[in-house]
Image (tube, grey):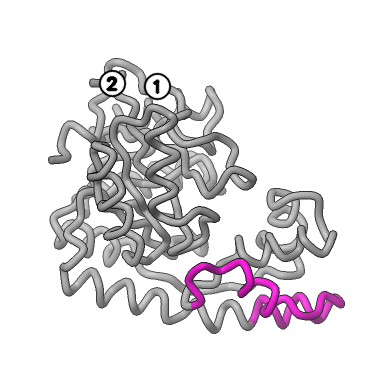
Amino acid sequence: MNALNADLHCHSTASDGTLAPADVVRRAAANGVDLLALTDHDELLGLPEAAAAAAELGLRFVPGVEISVSWLDQTLHIVGLGIDPSNVALIEGLAQVRGGRDGRAARIAAELERIGIRGAMEGALRYAGNPALVSRAHFARFLVEIGASRNVHDVFLHYLARGKPGYVEHVWATLEDAVGWIKGAGGLAVIAHPGRYRLSHAEMDILFDRFRELGGDAVEVACGAHDGGQLLAFARLARKFGLMASRASDFHGPEDSPIDLGRADPLPPDLTPVWTRLN
């Protein structure tokens, strides 16, 4: 089961991806993916299109979501897998989270204007397939377009990370809410790309312990954001806290992602893959 080509975290134009949901599915199938989850940020809009495309191609599909969480003054992400997209509490919770994005986008545009970058909101909107969900990635693509940075990665480093000119603080869902919404919708809760978080070893242990207490199920061990050393480190934490392991590309688009769909490293053979609990 560990050899299954599963990709359980990716994005479409319903949030900050560059491909439509059906095109994400087609690309995954062409790449030999056996099991795919679409997990747009705080949004379920792309799931029907993706599910229909997967059924047409005979690709096993899992409905998912990635929920933005504020924890210890940082933004974390919790992926929900195998959720019921019609669950009322989940729908209402995600609507609350998305409701704060408009204000954050306006503040980012204002901060960029202060350093002489005008028209950022209009520019970001041109890249947003879902105008109700303007993200930092959309601003990043605009900044690349106007030549402010060479690529999206550089934009985040120099403009949109904490302490940089375009960064603004924002309060998202609580960890308790995110895990509760996912579990209430019949899903499995997964800590996304933990190697991206600036947490000490002690803080990471606290996060994993609290996540497990809340009913969290798994952690992304193999993902596009992790190098080999991080894969081994989070495999150890999965064992320590009795969590299952997930595998994912965190694909956003051909130009924006460190790896393509289905190209994450394999999981260590002794870990229990999260997909063994997915229908």
Q: Foreground: 109 or 51? A: 51
- Residue drawn at (69%, 49%) of the image: 153
Circle 2/circle 1 CB separation < 8 Å: yes
CA separation in Å, label 2 and label 1? 7 Å
- Residue drawn at (32%, 64%) of the image: 44
Which callout, 2 or 1, points at the residue further toward the start of the chain?
2
User: What element does badge 1 sit on?
Assistant: loop
Give the quadrant of residue 123.
Answer: bottom right
Amino acid tagged 1: Pro
Q: Which residue is mark 2?
A: 2
Q: Is residue 19 above or below residue 110?
A: above
Give the quadrant of residue 36.
Answer: top left
User: What element does badge 2 sit on?
Assistant: loop
The N terminus, quarter of image: top left
Point out residue 111 in the picture as x, y percentages from the top left corner.
73, 78
Point out residue 233 in the picture as x, y percentages from the top left corner.
45, 27
- Residue drawn at (33%, 35%) of the image: 246
Amino acid tagged 2: Asn
Find residue 266 and name its label: 1
- Residue drawn at (44%, 49%) of the image: 23
The C terminus, quarter of image: top left
Q: Foreground: 133 or 236? A: 133
Tally the marks.
2
Pointer 1 local density, CA inside 10 Å: few below 14, some 14–19, many at least 20: some
Q: Is residue 207 above or below residue 139?
A: above
Point out residue 92 in the picture as x, y percentages from the top left corner.
25, 77
Find residue 201 and name its label: none
Q: What range of the chain is rendered magenta?
A: 107-131
Main SS of residues in magenta: helix
